Structure formats: C-alpha cells, structure tokens
C-alpha cells in the first residue's frame, strides 16, 4: 500500500461496485481489522449496510457494549446479536485445537448466514488480512474467517458472498488505514485479538466457567502490562492443575500462563522483556483475585517454534 488515502478511495469504490444496489452485512468484532472494514463499508454503502457484532460469549470483559459505543460515536449503529448458546454448543466436548477452530469457524459463518438471510443481504464484509490468508494457506492453522482461499464456497455453504477489502494488507498497514478513517486510538492501536477470541487461550474444553476465569485473568494482565505497550499480552488457562497451599489447606488448582510478545506482523514474535516487578504483581493479583488459580507462569517461547495463541 503506497498511499493510504488512495487505498481508502479505491476500496470504497470497489465495495460500491460489488454490492450495487443490494444490501451487505459487516462482521464487526471490534478489532482493528474488522473496525477499519466496517468504516470503509459504511462510507461506501451508508444505509445499505448493517453492522453486526456477534456476542459469542468469548469476548474480553465489557467488549460488546464498549465497541457499540465507540461506533455510535462515529455515527454507525451496531446490532449486537446474542449467539452464546450456538457457539458454546459448537465448542462443547472439543479439546483438539483444530477441532475447536473448525467448530468456531462453523458457528461464525452459520450465525452470519442467519443474519444475512434475515436482512436479505447477499454480501458479508469482513476484515481478513494478508497474514490470515498466508497462514491458513500454508496449513499453519484454521483461521475463523477463511473459506474461499481454501476452496470452500461461502455462497454454497452459507448463502452469501464474502468481500475482504483488507486482504492484501498487514497489521501495521491496517493501523494506518484505521487512523486515516478517523477511528479512535483505542481501536487503531488496539492489541490484535483473534477471531476465535478467548477460545484460543483455553487448553481443553471451552466452558463458560473456564472462559470466565481466563477473561478475569486477562483483565489483570492487560491492566498491568498497559504501560509497557506490548504487541499482544494475555492470560491462558491450562488443562493441567498444580497443587498449592491456600489458607493452610492444600488445593489442586488451575495453572494460568501469562503471555506477552513483541512483534511487527505476528508472523514471528519474541517474549516481551517485562520488568520482574510487573510479572510478580500479575502473579500476586491473579492468585489473590482468582483463588481457584494456584500457579502463574510467564511464557518464554518465541514464534517460532511456539505460536502466539495457544490453539
Ligand atoms: P498465532 O497464534 O498463529 O497468531 O501465532 C498470529 C496472530 O494471529 C492472531 N490469530 C487470529 N486472528 N483469527 C484471527 O482473526 C484467528 O483464527 C486467529 N488465530 C490467531 C493472533 O492473535 C496473533 O496476533
């Protein structure tokens, strides 16, 4: 992308041409990619666009309302659609990472399929970026928002065509586009957050209790690392347990991993050199505020060989 303004103009034109006089739905998750995409689509289509935020119950604390508020401030109404039951049902009993990713992708497209049908739209606009496509094509992972590129026709399976205005950009370029589009800094500098959300940070089955635990630990990690501005930082819940002593009693409790990485494009990453005092504070807060956790560990692996997320 040589010129941000030109890129925006071209994409707006392209979206208008593709959608014509029909209707489209924008899949908004509040991340930098889907936010930029929603603003582009809104500029292109105005009232022909419906922006939908699927509340799958796997977002970070307070996220659905916060995102709807930010977009209301930009004059874009966001419909929050509650699909928690469908997503938890799709993930039930699944422990294998790829099975979980595929279950999430299926729930993602089938819930948007229903929204598209309900609104008589023919297009789903989504914020897929270059890294998503590269990693899925290489077979590195099942990305929640990739279908066509791996030979699945969304029109046949789910009843809509997909438009991906950002598919040639990398994250740092999407941030430039987002800034130019007038999105607030809380969005254009937002940490990347994966489509399958907190499901990528839970080893073993995704249940609402386990999501609640990882969500609460994530709040603590994000608060404590904020001053250091890592590329990405979060908490992970393992399936293993470890013995602890709480109030003089032995307790076989949860183990939480703290992951913080530095990266430019998420294709490679290194652990953040966080100060020891910050790490200790995170550990003390997690065990004090979440008593079912008896152990907290800091992850020291780069990408490769590890991935950033845990599934
Ligand atoms: P990994 O874990 O593969 O992650 O090293 C690289 C970057 O991609 C994000 N990520 C995803 N983003 N859908 C997304 O939109 C996904 O399925 C997905 N999986 C990982 C991850 O947060 C990191 O920034």
Image (cartoon, rainbow, N blue to C red):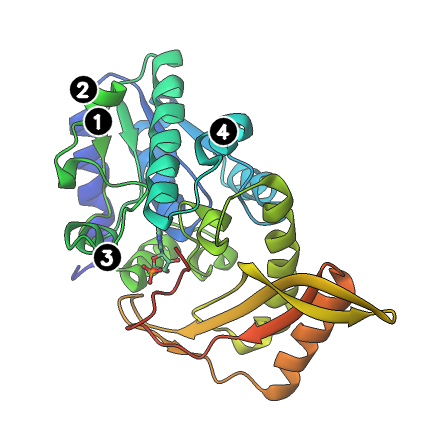
Q: Which of the numbered marks, if any, corresponds to residue 131?
A: 3
Would you call the spot at circle 1 few (<14 residues within 10 Å), some (14-19), or many (20 or more)?
Answer: some
The residue where tag 1 is placed is 154
Q: CA distance from mark 4 to mark 3?
A: 29 Å
Q: Nearer the viewer, residue 245 or 267?
A: 245
Would you call the spot at circle 4 few (<14 residues within 10 Å), some (14-19), or many (20 or more)?
Answer: few
The residue where tag 2 is placed is 156
Would you call the spot at circle 2 few (<14 residues within 10 Å), some (14-19), or many (20 or more)?
Answer: few
Q: Which of the numbered marks, if any, corresponds to residue 140?
A: none
For the residue labelled by badge 2, is the local secondary structure a helix, a strand or a loop?
Answer: helix
Q: Are marks 2 and 1 in contact (CB under 8 Å)?
A: yes
Q: CA distance from mark 4 to mark 2?
A: 23 Å
How far across and how far down the image is residue 92, in percent?
A: 49, 34
User: Which image quadrant shows ligand 1?
Assistant: bottom left
Q: CA distance from mark 1 to mark 3?
A: 20 Å
Where 177 sits versus 54, above or below? below
Q: Are marks 4 and 2 in contact (CB under 8 Å)?
A: no
Q: CA distance from mark 3 to mark 2?
A: 25 Å
Q: Nearer the viewer, residue 39 or 108?
A: 108
For the residue labelled by badge 4, is the local secondary structure a helix, a strand or a loop?
Answer: helix
Residue under the point 42% across and 38% down: 28
For the residue labelled by badge 3, is the local secondary structure a helix, a strand or a loop?
Answer: helix
């Amino acid at each position: 992308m040589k010129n941000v303004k030109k890129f925006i103009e071209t994409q707006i034109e392209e979206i208008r041409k593709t959608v014509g006089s029909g209707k489209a739905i924008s899949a908004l998750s509040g991340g930098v990619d889907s936010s930029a995409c929603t603003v582009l689509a809104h500029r292109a289509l105005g009232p022909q666009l419906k922006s939908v935020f699927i509340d799958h119950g796997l977002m970070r604390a307070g996220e659905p309302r916060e995102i709807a508020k930010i977009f209301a401030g930009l004059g874009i109404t966001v419909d929050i659609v509650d699909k928690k039951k469908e997503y938890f049902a799709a993930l039930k009993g699944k422990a294998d990472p790829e099975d979980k990713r595929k279950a999430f992708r299926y729930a993602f497209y089938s819930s948007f399929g229903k929204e598209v049908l309900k609104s008589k739209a023919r297009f789903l606009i989504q914020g897929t970026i270059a890294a998503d496509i590269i990693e899925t094509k290489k077979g590195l992972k099942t990305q929640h928002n990739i279908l066509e590129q791996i030979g699945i026709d969304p029109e046949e399976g789910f009843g809509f065509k997909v438009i991906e205005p950002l598919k040639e950009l990398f994250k740092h370029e999407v941030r430039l586009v987002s800034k130019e589009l007038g999105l607030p800094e809380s969005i254009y500098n937002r940490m990347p957050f994966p489509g399958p959300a907190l499901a990528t940070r839970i080893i073993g089955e995704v249940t609402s209790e386990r999501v609640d635990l990882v969500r609460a630990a994530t709040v603590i990690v994000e608060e404590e690392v904020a001053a250091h501005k890592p590329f990405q930082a979060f908490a992970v819940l393992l399936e293993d347990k470890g013995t602890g002593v709480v109030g003089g009693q032995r307790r076989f409790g949860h183990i939480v991993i703290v992951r913080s990485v530095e990266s430019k494009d998420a294709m490679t990453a290194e652990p953040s050199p966080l100060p020891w005092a910050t790490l200790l504070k995170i550990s003390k807060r997690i065990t004090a505020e979440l008593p079912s956790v008896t152990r907290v560990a800091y992850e020291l692996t780069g990408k490769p060989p590890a991935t950033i997320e845990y599934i």
